[in-house]
C-alpha cells in the first residue's frame, strides 16, 4: 500500500522568516554569446551567460558547458579566464572551466548563499523565462534544458542535494505547455484525486528534479576551492574595471548586474516573496504557478510571487500573510494559526 503524503505544519510556531529574492529576467530570453567589448584602447572578449530569470538553477549546468565551449573557441584550451559573478551560473561556469584545465578567478560582490541563487527553491522547470519564437533559438534553449537535466541526473544526488520528487498541481493551476516541450520532464498526468490537500479534488502530477540550493551551491564552492581557484570579493562600479582585468577573456555571469555594467536594458527584476518554515521532509512538491511548496533541506519554502519590475527586497507583510493563508486553505488549516479546522 502506498504511503499517504504527510500534511505540513504551517502553524505560526513553524514560521521562521519571510524573504524576497530578485529574479534576473530578460526580455527576449537568456543571453549566451560572445561579444568583443572595447573602450578606448582597451578590448576584452566577453562571453555572456546571464538572464536566466526564474530558472537559473534549472539551466546552470547546461549553460556552463555552452559558455565554456565559447571560451575554448575564443582563446583555446587552458587560457586563464575571469568569471564575473558567483551565483549558481557563475560558480557552475567556473567549475566547468576549471575541470577543462583553465586557471579561473571568480570576481563577485557576493557569493553562493548570499546571492539570489541561495534563495531559489529549486524545482527543475523553465519558469520565469522568455522562450524565443519557434526556430533555431528555441531549439537551442530546449537543447540546453535537456543537457542541464542530463548533467543534474548524472550528479551524486546526496553530495549535490538533488532528488526526484513527485509534483502535485491542483485543478486550475496554470498549465504552460512550453515548460515541458524540451521533453526533460514528462507531461503532467491528470488524476481524479490529489493525495495532498484538504479537498482531495482532481489535479495533475508529474515527477521533477529538485535541487536543495544551499547544498548545491556549497558543492560548487567546494569543487572550485579544491581545484585552487579563488573567489575574489569585488564589486565592479563600471565597465572600465572589467576591461582592466588581466585575464584575456571574461565570462559575464553578473545577472542583473549586466544591466548597468554592459548596458543591457532588456534586463528587468522580478521579485519573489517566500515564507520559510521549519524544515519538513515531506517528500513532495505542491505547484500552483508561483503558489508552491518546496521541502528544501534547510526550510519548508512557501511561495510566492512573481512581480516584474519590483526590486525592493523587503517582503511586504500583507503578501506574507496572503501566502500563508493560501497554503493553509489548501491543506484545510485555519487561516490565522494554521491549526486543523475545527470539526463542524
Ligand atoms: C523566489 C525565487 C525562487 C526561485 N525558484 C527557482 C526554482 O525553483 N528553480 C530555478 O531553477 N530557479 C529559481 N529561481 C531563479 C534563480 O534563483 C535565478 O535564475 C538564479 O539564481 C540566477 O543565477 P545567477 O548566478 O545568474 O544570478 P545571481 O545568483 O543573482 O548571481 C549574480 C552574481 O553577480 C554578482 N554581481 C552582480 N553585479 C555585480 C557587480 N557590479 N560587481 C560584482 N559582482 C556583481 C552578484 O554578487 C552575484 O555573485 C528563483 C528565484 C527566486 C528569486
Image: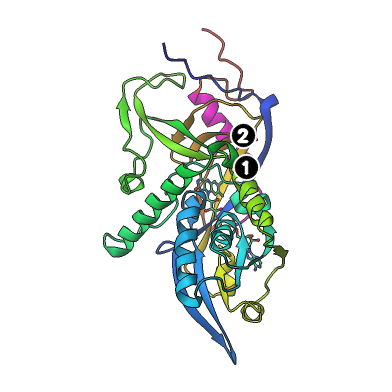
What number is the disc on residue 46?
A: none
Q: Is residue 209 in the magenta section?
A: no
Is residue 329 a member of the stretch shown in magenta? yes
In terms of depth relative to the viewer, which is nearer, 252 or 335? 252
**Which residue is more in the foreground, 238 or 242?**
242
- Residue 116: x and y, percent? 61, 52
Q: Is residue 230 left or right of residue 116?
A: right
- Residue located beneath label 2 in the image: 297
**Residue 130 visible in the shown view:** yes
Image: 180 above or below 206: below
Image quarter where the N terminus lies is: top left
Q: Specify how the rendered protein is coloured.
A: rainbow
- Check disc 1 and report the residue beneath it: 215
Local packing at callout 2 (Cα closer than 10 Å; few below 14, some 14-19, many 20+) is some
Instruction: Please tell me whether the stretch drawn in magenta is mainly helix, strand or loop.
Output: helix
Circles 2 and 1 in contact, beta carbons < 8 Å: yes
User: Residue 322, can we see it?
Assistant: no
Amino acid at each position: 500500500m502506498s504511503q499517504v503524503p504527510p500534511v505540513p505544519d504551517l502553524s505560526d510556531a513553524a514560521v521562521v522568516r519571510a524573504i524576497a529574492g530578485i529574479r534576473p529576467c530578460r526580455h527576449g530570453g537568456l543571453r549566451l554569446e560572445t561579444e568583443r567589448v572595447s573602450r578606448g584602447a582597451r578590448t576584452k572578449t566577453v562571453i555572456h551567460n546571464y538572464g536566466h530569470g526564474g530558472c537559473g538553477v534549472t539551466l546552470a549546468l547546461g549553460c556552463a558547458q555552452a559558455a565554456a565551449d565559447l571560451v575554448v573557441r575564443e582563446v583555446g584550451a587552458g587560457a586563464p579566464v575571469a568569471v564575473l559573478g558567483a551565483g549558481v551560473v557563475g560558480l557552475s561556469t567556473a567549475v566547468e572551466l576549471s575541470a577543462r584545465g583553465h586557471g579561473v578567478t571568480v570576481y563577485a560582490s557576493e557569493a553562493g548563499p548570499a546571492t539570489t541563487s541561495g534563495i531559489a527553491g529549486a524545482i527543475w522547470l523553465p519558469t520565469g523565462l522568455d522562450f524565443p519564437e519557434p526556430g533555431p533559438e528555441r531549439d537551442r534553449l530546449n537543447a540546453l534544458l535537456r543537457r542541464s537535466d542530463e548533467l543534474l541526473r548524472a550528479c551524486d544526488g546526496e553530495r549535490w542535494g538533488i532528488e526526484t520528487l513527485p509534483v502535485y498541481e491542483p485543478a486550475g493551476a496554470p498549465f504552460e505547455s512550453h515548460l515541458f516541450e524540451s521533453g526533460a520532464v514528462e507531461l503532467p498526468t491528470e488524476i481524479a484525486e490529489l493525495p495532498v490537500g484538504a479537498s482531495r479534488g482532481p489535479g495533475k502530477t508529474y515527477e521533477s528534479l529538485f535541487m536543495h540550493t544551499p547544498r548545491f551551491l556549497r558543492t560548487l564552492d567546494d569543487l572550485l576551492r579544491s581545484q585552487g581557484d579563488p573567489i575574489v570579493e569585488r564589486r565592479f562600479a563600471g565597465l572600465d574595471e572589467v576591461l582592466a582585468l588581466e585575464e584575456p577573456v571574461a565570462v559575464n555571469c553578473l545577472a542583473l548586474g549586466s544591466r548597468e555594467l554592459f548596458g543591457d536594458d532588456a534586463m528587468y527584476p522580478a521579485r519573489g516573496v517566500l515564507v520559510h518554515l521549519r524544515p519538513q521532509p515531506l517528500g513532495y512538491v505542491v505547484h500552483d504557478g508561483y503558489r508552491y511548496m518546496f521541502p528544501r533541506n534547510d526550510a519548508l519554502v512557501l511561495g510566492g510571487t512573481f512581480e516584474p519590475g519590483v526590486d525592493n527586497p523587503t517582503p511586504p507583510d500583507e503578501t506574507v500573510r496572503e501566502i500563508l493563508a493560501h497554503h493553509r486553505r489548501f491543506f484545510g488549516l485555519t487561516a490565522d494559526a494554521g491549526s486543523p479546522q475545527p470539526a463542524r
